[in-house]
Amino acid sequence: MIINLLINGKLHAIEAPEEMPLLWAIRDIIGLTGTKFGCGVSQCGACSVLLDGQLIKSCSLPVSGADGKEILTIEGSSENLEFLRQAWSDGNVPQCGYCQSGQLIAATSLLDTTENPTDNEIDAVMSANICRCGTYTRIKKAIHKAVTLKNEVI
């Protein structure tokens, strides 16, 4: 089956079984390996992407469910993602880094819908992403820092 995926602004017409998880299409067919496989059961968030602006776990969505939709992965760019990348770097957020692409995409989703999130709003969105290294405090600080960085530009 031919499936059209608009990933990070670029159209990819791929041939794949319609039930293949979107994650494997992104990684194995398209070659964008920043989106990670963590658990495979939609629990850890390492595979998070934005699908038409909505945060989803790509390991559990059949690629056919993304046909014709806009996908943002960690390799892509958006205003909020750029501020978050800077804040992540400034705050030395990652340790092992494995979960960070999913963490950054989840944080992007949050800032896309909430201009200045509270700690509780951050916790509510980010709790769906697991960090084995426990960098949650640094992640929260970096999200607040990204808001500050964005406000300095405006």
Image (tube, rainbow, N blue to C red):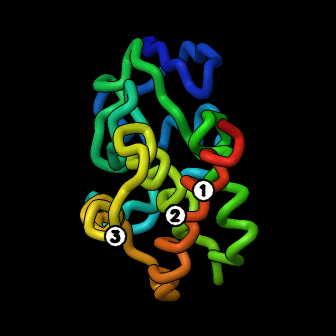
In this picture, is 37 found above or below 35?
Answer: below
Which residue is pictured at 25% across the width and 63% down the height? 124
**Label number found at residue 148:** 1
Can residue 129 be seen?
A: yes
- What residue does disc 2 label? 144
Q: Please tell me which of labels 2 and 3 falls first in the chain.
A: 3
Q: Amino acid at mark 1?
A: Thr
Q: Amino acid at mark 3?
A: Asp
Residue 39 x, y percent position in the rendering: 36, 67
Q: Mark 3: give few (<14), some (14-19) or many (20+) Cα within 10 Å.
A: few
Which residue is pictured at 63% across the width and 73% down the height? 97
Which residue is pictured at 60% across the width and 14% down the height? 11
In this picture, is 10 found above or below 81?
Answer: above
Q: Secondary structure at mark 1?
A: helix
Q: Mark 1: give few (<14), some (14-19) or many (20+) Cα within 10 Å.
A: some
Q: Quadrant of the N terminus?
A: top left
- What residue does disc 3 label? 119
Q: Quadrant of the C terminus?
A: top right
Rounded to the nearest angstrom, the CA distance separating label 1 from label 3 is: 14 Å
Rounded to the nearest angstrom, the CA distance separating label 2 from label 3 is: 9 Å
Residue 61 x, y percent position in the rendering: 29, 39
**Label number found at residue 56:** none
Rounded to the nearest angstrom, the CA distance separating label 2 from label 1 is: 6 Å
Which residue is pictured at 55% across the width and 53% down the height? 147
Residue 56 x, y percent position in the rendering: 33, 43
Can residue 31 be seen?
A: no
Q: Secondary structure at mark 2?
A: helix
Pointer 1 with pointer 3, Cβ within 8 A: no
Pointer 2 with pointer 3, Cβ within 8 A: no
Q: Nearer the viewer, mark 1 or mark 3?
A: 1
Q: Mark 2: give few (<14), some (14-19) or many (20+) Cα within 10 Å.
A: some
